[in-house]
Image (cartoon, rainbow, N blue to C red):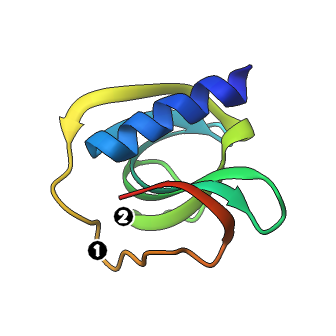
Amino acid sequence: MHVINNYIVLVSAIKEMRFVTFNYDGLDRVVECATLGYTTAGMPAVRGYQTAGDTHSGTVPCWRLFRIDRIRGLELTEARFAGEPPAYERSDKAFSRIDAEI
């Protein structure tokens, strides 16, 4: 159920171009979601441009692929992002199926 609820929220985030916040691998993140679907390995995932928060690599902003089953405390914010994030590429090759894309 957790994955389904996150999936629904992420579809809204992409369609409405709204930032999301969540915890991933124990770190809080702020993300512009760009592509949602299933990876070539069959896992539900979202490609997002992390604009704030913590990372294990220490690099922000950056593009990341987040597995939806590992996202905790997902919240859709009121803040919107304008247009495509930097270096955005449509039809992300990491996905075998894309269900939502900006």
Q: How many numbered marks does the figure carry?
A: 2
Callout 1 secondary element: loop
Q: Which residue is mark 1?
A: 86
Gap in angstroms between the C-alphas marked 1 and 2 = 10 Å
| Residue 70 placement, left or right of 98 | right
- The residue singled out by tag 2 in the image is 61
Residue 18: percent from left, percent from top: 28, 40
The reply to whether callout 1 and callout 2 are in contact (CB within 8 Å) is: yes
The answer to which quarter of the image holds residue 19 is top left
Please tell me in which quadrant of the rendered image residue 27 appears.
top right
- Kind of residue at badge 1: Pro
The percent position of residue 53, horizontal first and vertical second, equals 41, 45
Residue 16 visible in the displayed image? yes
Residue at coordinates 34% horizontally, 80% vertically from top-left? 87
Residue closest to the far right:
41
Q: Residue at x 48, y 30 (%)?
A: 9
Q: In this rendering, is residue 61 above or below 36?
A: below
